[in-house]
Amino acid sequence: MNFLSDTTAPAHPALLESLTRANSGYAASYGNDVISAELTDRLSDIFSTDLDFVLTTSGTASNALALSVLCPPHGMILCHDEAHIHRDERGAPEFFTGGAKLLPLAGEHAKIDVSALENALNQWPQDFVHAPPPRALSISNLNESGCAYSPTELKALTQRAKSEALNIHFDGARFANALVSSGESAASMSWQSGADVLCLGATKNGALGAEAILLLGDARRHLPELQARQKRSGHMGPKARYIAAQMLAWLRDDLWLDLARTANAAAAEVADTLRNAGADVIHPVDGNEVFVRLDEELAAQLRSAGVGFYSWPDGSARFVACWSTTDDEIKALEQALNG
């Protein structure tokens, strides 16, 4: 009964099989192999646009590298107060940008409120020499409370940010979960909603460790600088074909969406199970994460029964479903809740 995180889940067999196929003979290094070329075509097809990308093995590396080409050292990155880049990446964005400031914004259910963005843009002008100017807006989708932005919500934020010439970064560690929840296309939830860069994560959804920084539209001009920073920071994998093989298998025949759909459905069942036991679900369940309020007695009861979940800093409990979550695990959770 492991509901701690989707990073605890095993890799999907299709990705392991893809690695085995890739592990044959010799291949060009640093992304110049035929698998990476095929991945380029597949990503362009899925996102309905020409794009460039680099591969990494962690979401933190992807976010930090992406932001390093979107925001200068003297600039500021706007994000939600709950954003992963703010709370869970040990200052990596500040480190990789060379000192850019993060400004956390408010909003219910970890969604940036348009008025909070407006206030920040008014309070931090671009031309005041004594303060860091806003240069990038970062949006997580799914976000850190398991909620999904709609294209309309995204556009309201990105259009206002772009009116001040901000670059737009989307943290898509759980992008697939947001996509299947919304029923939207990859294009409508990324570049058509204003994203310049999308960090597309597979690690939480079936991969061993595979992430892609997608450069969209005019942001493709950043590719040389992004590659240079990737190399200098030690995140340019020489045997990139193995990362590309994971990503390609993940995307093939829409496996990535099927896995996210399975995880989302399991999370919905977990939420219903917890509600039926009297727990208070505190955020909309738009993906594979469930946040609840548990009294101390019930929390202790679950832990003693072997249920793994994460205690969130605000005092709530987070339960995460994965592509591999089984009906038996959910039934066991129900039994543990009933004592």
Image (spheres, grey):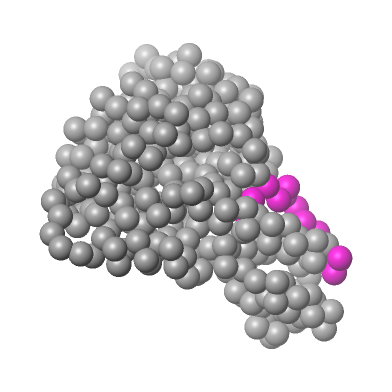
Would residue 102 be found to the left or right of residue 117 on screen? Answer: left
Report the residue at 46% width, 42% height from top: 171
In the rendered image, the vertical position of residue 273 relative to residue 176, given as above or below: below
In the rendered image, the vertical position of residue 62 relative to residue 127, given as above or below: below
State the quadrant of the C terminus. Answer: bottom right
In the rendered image, the vertical position of residue 242 relative to residue 137, given as above or below: below
Residue situated in front as seen by the camera: 312 or 278 = 278
The answer to whether any part of residue 78 appears in the image is no
Q: Quadrant of residue 305?
A: bottom right
Residue situated in front as seen by the camera: 311 or 2 = 2
Would residue 87 be found to the left or right of residue 65 on screen? Answer: right
Q: Quadrant of residue 181?
A: top right
Residue situated in front as seen by the camera: 336 or 314 = 336
Q: Main secondary structure of the magenta part?
A: loop
Residue situated in front as seen by the camera: 49 or 83 = 49
Would residue 97 be found to the left or right of residue 168 on screen? Answer: left
Report the residue at 26% width, 42% height from top: 37
State the quadrant of the N terminus. Answer: bottom right
Number of residue marks: 0
Report the residue at 43% width, 44% height from top: 200
Which residues fall within the magenta stretch? 276-290
Asked if the stretch drawn in magenta spans residue 157, the answer is no
Report the residue at 13% width, 51% height from top: 28
